Image: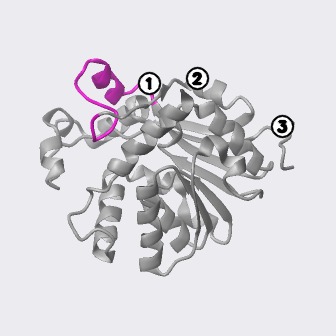
Amino acid sequence: MVNKKIDEVKQFWDNRPCNIRHSKKKLGSIEYFEEVDRRRYFVEPHIIKFADFNKWRGKEVLEIGCGIGTDAIRFAKSGAKYTATELSKESLDITQQRFKEYGLKGKFYLGNAEELSSLIPEKKYDLIYSFGVIHHSPNPDAIISEIKNFMNNDTELRIMLYASNSWKNILIEAGLDQPEAQFGCPIAYTYTKDEIANLLNDFKIIKCQQDHIFPYVLEKYIQHEYEVQPWFKAMQPHMFQALKKVLGWHMLIRCKLKSNISTSLS
């Protein structure tokens, strides 16, 4: 059953890799990748602060679920020693093409992060990063368990999970929205802070905060026009910022292993 679910998830992202329609330029060109980059960080500017790309210069970075490589390129450009895993072959192919176009180096592994120890060579990383990926797995607990094997007490884990208590999830539960831009996402778990604490039971959470409410008229956004919904447009900027901290869709989590936790690769 789990393998069947993994196949469903893989097929979903192979059919339409995340953010692949962020540009109308020729797929795989520098112009395409530059536009994808601009659009991602315009709509989700909190990613830049959360990932803190420049902090990892000269450091070993492992990304779980690189997608089409937008954050990956930022890490590599900032001088990180970058490694990626990705379930979707279509997505990973685009990421590798992206690195080739920019003349950057990285290590890339295709496969299921629930089986990370059999997927990539054994080593410790300075940062393990995963933005909006783990909640799409049939077994997020398995990924977290595997991640621990690639950490020591100095390794930082930074992940984004969808928040249950969020503006978007309220709309989803009311039948007015869906978790992803494309219809039919097989799995998209959401989490309360208590559920995150349970998932990360072996970790000391450094920071956990919410951010990101998508404010644009969807029909216009698809056409690359950024018209803010009237109810958000009426808000003062500081009010909208405060709302994101309480009802944001993205739960941004930074943590480290508890000092008493041993791993199989220690």
Q: Which residues are magenta?
A: 163-183
Q: Left or right of 159: which side holds 142?
A: right
The numbered mark at residue 164 is 1
Give the CA distance from mark 3 to mark 1. Answer: 28 Å
The type of residue carrying mark 3 is: Ile
On the image, the x and y values in percent for residue 223 come to 13, 53
Q: Residues within 10 Å of mark 2 (few under 14, many from 20)?
A: few
Where is residue 182 shown, x and y percent of the image? 28, 40
Q: Is residue 243 magenta?
A: no
Q: Judge left or right: residue 227 versus residue 255.
A: left
- Dot 3 or dot 1, earlier in sequence: 1
- Image position of 28 with respect to 22: above or below: below
The answer to whether the residue labelled 2 contacts the one labelled 1, judged by CB atoms less than 8 Å apart, is yes
Please report the residue visible at 36 percent of the width from the left and 57 percent of the height from the top.
41
- Judged from the image, the secondary structure of the residue bearing numbered disc 2 is helix
Alpha carbon separation for disc pair 2 and 1: 10 Å
- Please name the amino acid that badge 1 sits on: Ser
Q: Residue shown at 66%/52% (left/top)?
A: 119
- Residue that carries the numbered disc 2 in the rendered image: 195
Q: Position of residue 24 (x, y in %)?
A: 20, 64
Where, by quadrant of the figure, is residue 52 drawn?
Answer: bottom right
